[in-house]
Image (cartoon, grey):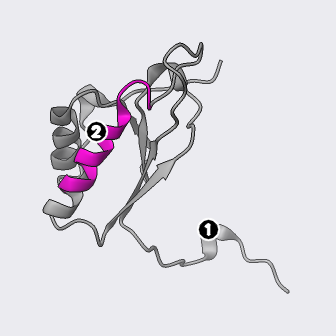
Amino acid sequence: MTQVEMSSMDVPQLYKRHIFACHTQRPPTHPRGSCGAAGAQPLWDQLLRRIEAEGLAAEIGFTASGCLGFCSVGPLMVIYPEGVWYRPKTPEDIDEIVESHLKGGRLAEDLVVVLARS
């Protein structure tokens, strides 16, 4: 079997964008915190409703993920292929992400979070 360099492959993509949203739920007193304890579920429900309402479900993948590794700053989601991390706090934040990033192809700049491993 020959190896093919990834850069030379033309792999068809299933989605234009794919969202991974943390659904980890730890107890509210857990020292690391969690996206679930920070109120993620209603935001992700809003995101799914908006994706469907806007007719984007065929081109936007949504995956409920486990911990994304930055528990204390949640709720967190990341959108690929751009690799942009967002920290929405309200349903209005979700609406802005849908309008700007998913529909308009622009960053929802006020909601972008830049993460760094310590």
Residue 89 numbered mark, or none: none
Q: Is residue 101 visible?
A: no
Secondary structure beneath dot 2 equals helix
> What secondary structure is found at the residue carrying circle 1?
helix
Q: As shown in the figure, which amino acid type bears the numbered disc 1? A: Ser
* Three-letter code for the amino acid on which mark 2 is drawn: Pro
The x and y percentages for residue 44 are 32, 44
Asked which quadrant contains residue 40, the reply is top left
Q: Which dot marks residue 42? A: 2
Stretch in magenta: 36-50
Q: How crowded is the residue under tag 1: few (<14 C-alpha within 10 Å), some, or many (20+)?
A: few
* In this picture, residue 83 sits left or right of residue 50: right
Q: Is residue 52 magenta?
A: no
View extreme (bottom): residue: 1
Determine which residue is flagged by label 1: 7
Dominant SS type (magenta):
helix
Q: Residue at horizontal 45%, vertical 21%?
A: 73
Task: Check contact, mark 1 vs mark 2: CB within 8 A.
Answer: no
Looking at the image, residue 49 lies above or below residue 43: below
Instruction: List x then y, in percent, for residue 83.
Output: 46, 45
Name the residue nearer the viewer: 99 or 92.
92
